[in-house]
Amino acid sequence: MPGPGPRNLITDVPGLLVGQAEDTRLRSGVTVLLGEAPFAVAADIRGGAPGTRDVEALEPVSLVEAIDAICLSGGSAFGLDAPGGVQSYLKAKGRGFQIAPGAPLVPVVSGAILFDLANGGDKEWGETPPYRALGRAAAEAAAQDFALGNAGAGLGAVAGGLKGGIGSASWATDDGITVGALVAVNAVGSALMPGSGVFWAWPYEQNGEFGGRRPKPDMPTVSSELPPDMKGAVRPGANTTIAVVATDAALTRVELKRLAIMAADGFARALRPAHTPFDGDLVYAVSTTRRPLAEPRPRAVMRLGNIAADTLARAIARGVYAAGTLGSVKSWRDAFPG
């Protein structure tokens, strides 16, 4: 029967591992998706304030067919050092792209960052930002099981007016394909229906994975105005929800691009507003190419894109649901006890 995979994590997709490292004093961290082998990938950017490394190289017209890792990091622009730490780790392991005979292998690591520099942590690190070391530590910790909420890149994240965090979810189809999502939720928009503890993603929830709350009949009609519980001080570059969706279906890079585009709807299913001028919303789409795709291929891609969007919406809600209060930023559990 179709449903969440055994872990309900992106690592239910065979061949993928996730590692995380964080610094509680800093209130920031790094989350890394590693493949047991290089994986095909594409990306789609919908937000107006992205911060990325080596995303243009993922376009289907570019040279590199597969990469070794994806790095999600806190730290804003300082966090773009984190992929370098992952790259160093992978080079020591003999991983990488053979550019020319006799030349060193070059591990290809793409990265995206979120803003967590104003969350009250100690950011006086001197001349050496900690993110390269955190990236390496996250890669060293890669495993099938990993924490949600205040972990990795989600440690310092804030989602609307509540604590954000790392979320993940998965879905196994009845014909044996697995889709997973991994997300660091640091959005301007709110994950909750106004005045309630009900997640916008409630229609997609599986097995009470984010609390099981449902809207009451007397709840107000959804307004087209901005929600009152979004982030109060909205600033460009101060937010971002960054995500990965993955599948073991053997998709081409062009098909992965479409998967990423469709999966971005998961933001809109779980956050209001989404893709704002102040967010850097980005979705990577990954394929480990282990399972053949059924014909006709366009219809199969359409189906997987819809599953990926729902799975990403669930992962966003799980990231907020699992987070704990940090400093003055309340968690969902503390804001809506019981």
Image (cartoon, helix red, strand yellow):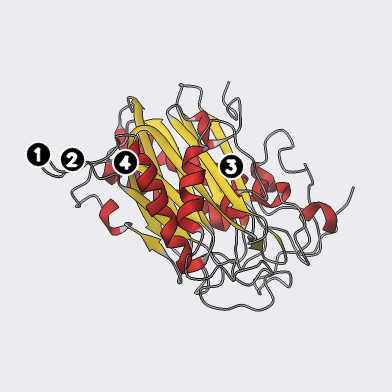
> Which comes before the other along the chain, label 4 or label 2?
4
The answer to whether marks 1 and 4 mark residues whose Cβ atoms lie closer than 8 Å is no
Mark 3: amino acid: Ser
- Residue 203 left/right relative to 36: right
Query: Label 3, on which residue?
Result: 168
CA distance for labels 1 and 4: 16 Å
The answer to whether marks 3 and 2 mark residues whose Cβ atoms lie closer than 8 Å is no
CA distance for labels 3 and 1: 40 Å
Mark 4: amino acid: Lys
CA distance for labels 3 and 2: 32 Å
Query: Label 2, on which residue?
Result: 98
Which of the two marks, 3 or 1, is nearer to us in this view? 1
The answer to whether marks 3 and 1 mark residues whose Cβ atoms lie closer than 8 Å is no
Task: Name the residue located 65 percent from the left edge and 68 percent from the top edge.
Answer: 122
Which of the two marks, 3 or 2, is nearer to us in this view? 2
Task: Name the residue located 52 percent from the left edge and 68 percent from the top edge.
Answer: 279
Q: What percent of the width, then of the height, locates residue 315?
A: 60, 45
The answer to whether marks 2 and 1 mark residues whose Cβ atoms lie closer than 8 Å is yes
* Image mark for residue 192: none
CA distance for labels 3 and 4: 28 Å
Mark 2: amino acid: Gln
* Image mark for residue 101: 1
Query: Label 4, on which residue?
Result: 91
CA distance for labels 4 and 2: 12 Å
